[in-house]
Image: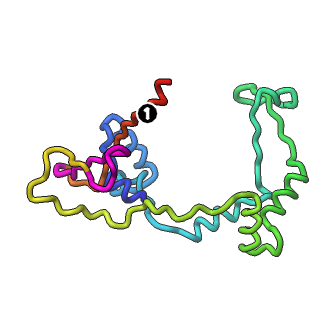
Amino acid sequence: LSEISFKFGEDASPFSLCPDIALSLHRVPPSEALCGGSLLYEFDPDGISSVLSKLTLDSVRVQHQAKSLADRCTEKDTSYGSPMAFLPIEPSWIASWTSALYPGDRSAEASKSFAAELGMHLPKPNPFIPEDLSLKQLPSEPPAFPVSLKGLAPPLACVFHRQDDTFKQPKAQVSFSIYTPFLGQ
């Protein structure tokens, strides 16, 4: 998706593009400066696993911010003098999180079942990720104006379409006009 977004993205204004390119030079080689912040270069499962292995209950940090907690704060921030406190995480929280992390026999299926009981699930694959970005052949005489597409009854909806013959990009712009008597009531 990041490659599609980079390849077919909207043109950026030079005023915002120049600082972005200059900043990307701190992170990527000059040959990659134009696409540095937009492309995922390689899938690194070992690197991902390494980072995820450091996210443990032993290293978790919970931060609460609210004016209503000011009376519990016993220390002051050195930079701004804001009230703050460092407290250990309640053991009941850790126990609850541990049981959620390792339910039943600690298998992936047990985790899925436990998550389903809580109303959680992995998202379904996104059916809107394009696989073929090739453009359809333009008619020999492209229409000057959008034409009505067939298949929808006019009382319900009208859909108009005109294939781009200038920029030749696999994009669409959608506009809706909704008329309803209920808005006037």
Of 163 and 94, the residue lying toward us:
163
Callout 1: few (<14), some (14-19), or many (20+) C-alpha neighbours within 10 Å?
A: few
- Residue of label 1: 180
Q: Amino acid at mark 1?
A: Thr
Q: Quadrant of residue 18?
A: top left
Of 62 and 19, the residue lying toward us:
62
Magenta highlight range: 149-166
Q: Position of residue 132 (x, y in %)?
A: 33, 66
Query: Residue sitting at 81 percent across and 68 percent down?
Result: 103
Q: Position of residue 181 (x, y in %)?
A: 44, 30
| Residue 46 vertical position relative to residue 29 in the rendered view, above or below | below
Q: Overall secondary structure of the magenta stretch?
A: loop
| Residue 181 vertical position relative to residue 116 in the rendered view, above or below | above
Query: Residue sitting at 46 percent across and 24 percent down?
Result: 184
Q: Is residue 117 one of those drawn in magenta?
A: no
Q: Residue furthest left?
A: 141
Query: Residue sitting at 86 percent across and 48 percent down?
Result: 89
Query: Residue sitting at 56 percent across and 70 percent down?
Result: 45
Q: Is residue 159 one of those drawn in magenta?
A: yes
**In what element is the residue under mark 1?**
loop
Q: Position of residue 182 (x, y in %)?
A: 48, 30
